[in-house]
Amino acid sequence: MSGRPSLVFLDDDHVLRILRLILCNAENESRVRDFFVPENPDFSSLIALAEGLRRSDGANVALASESATRADASVLIFRRGSITKELLASYRRLKLVQRLGERADDIDVAAAEARGVYVSCFPRLTVQLTAEHAVLLMLALAKRLVPADKMLRDGQHPRTTRSPMDGVLYNWVGVDAPGGLYGKTLGIIGLGEIGSIVARIARGFGMHVLYFNRHRIPPERELASAAEYSALGDLLARSDFVSLHANLPGNTKIADRRFFDRMKRSAFFINTSRGQLVDEDALYEALTAGKIAGAGLDVHASEPRPAGERFTALSNVVLTPHIAGGSRSGVLQEFEVIVRNCSAAMRGEPPSYRVRPRRSASA
């Protein structure tokens, strides 16, 4: 085996694809630059950190699906999937398993440790910000934030009589039934990395949290997220807010007419995942026919959403232009963590955010 690093990407995730292209010296290609639009990031710091790890330095950078990658792989990089004992055994020269994300429950950390392979998983800022944005949309809808702001700016003052007690004038613009999150039920569809954070935040607001996954998560993850498993139909019927956090493959238009028909008429629908998960004709019908109370959408079936498009005219919808994850430049910080860890592993040093095997209760 040569001493050159060999970085193998297990999945072609759209974020990791950008890192792979940068390591392949393609940082100036349009598909990389387009990922960061409208920002124009400076890659110089990342490229400097990646010295010795880029294709131009002699490193091998490849997808696992490409031939001849297992024989000399130094690092496995992935976002989704599982790292099993059997998979680890097939990479005989491995030094590091690096995940883009903080979950380690589907990595056989003990098997990696036994083989002298480091494991690193780290919390992603973009994931945290997306979860915050989902809750922001819930709050905006519950508290009627957008119409309240507009009515105040438009100078609507249907009430002018102040309280004789303290001189205040409650809700002088006449916002219709502003509410909140406390005591409400949140249904999360897809209790993955983002959904789990949404669940934790929601519990802080005093919400009861239900979740639906195609495959129920392990009990320890349920306990950590304080979420109750529910069948999809039951979740839709019970929830005051339904927040979508499913992955796109296999779930196109999962939120269809039957989906919205099963929701409460007083419920709100939230989507910060992917616009293609929603049948927007069915959603529009549900919103205009009073089948649901409102929707908060950061992602859209077609982006950009045209000015004057039908959803923009609905007062019970809050729209944002796919900004839930925050600045795209934040992704570069995540890439820097990965690159630093790869360099450390090649030197035989432990990575940051190292994951160690759990000790048994009897140990």
Image (cartoon, rainbow, N blue to C red):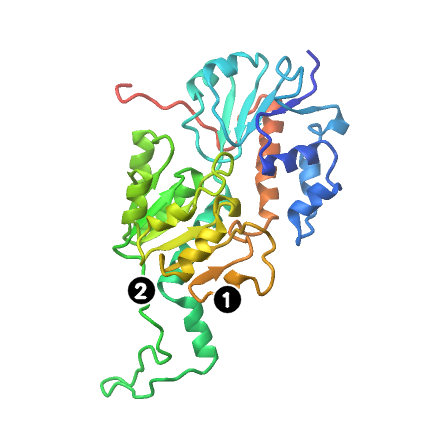
- What kind of residue is marked 1? Ala
Question: Which circle, 1 or 2, is nearer the viewer?
Answer: 1
Quarter of image, res 192 = top left
Q: What percent of the width, then of the height, locates residue 64?
A: 61, 22
How far, Cα to Cα, is label 1 from label 2?
22 Å
> Which residue is found at the position 42% from the left and 82% from the top?
156
In this view of the protein, can residue 306 be seen by the observer? yes
Q: Which quadrant does the N terminus fall into?
A: top right
> Which residue is found at the position 57% from the left and 19% from the top?
95
Q: Identify the secondary structure beneath mark 1.
A: helix
* Mark 2 burial class by Cα count in 10 Å: few <14, some 14-19, many 20+: few
Q: What percent of the width, then of the height, locates residue 84?
A: 46, 18
- What kind of residue is marked 2? Gly
Q: Identify the secondary structure beneath mark 2.
A: loop
Q: Nearer the viewer, residue 205 or 188?
A: 188
Which mark is drawn over residue 103? none
Q: Nearer the viewer, residue 43 or 15?
A: 15
Instruction: Describe residue 99's horizontal placement relative to residue 287 as left or right.
Output: right
Residue located beneath label 2 in the image: 179
Quarter of image, res 333 = top right
Residue located beneath label 1 in the image: 313
Instruction: Describe residue 349's horizontal placement relative to residue 26 as left or right.
Output: left
Q: Which quadrant does the C terminus fall into?
A: top left
Q: Residue furthest left?
A: 165
Q: What percent of the width, then of the height, locates residue 228?
A: 28, 39
Q: What percent of the width, then of the height, locates residue 36?
A: 65, 48
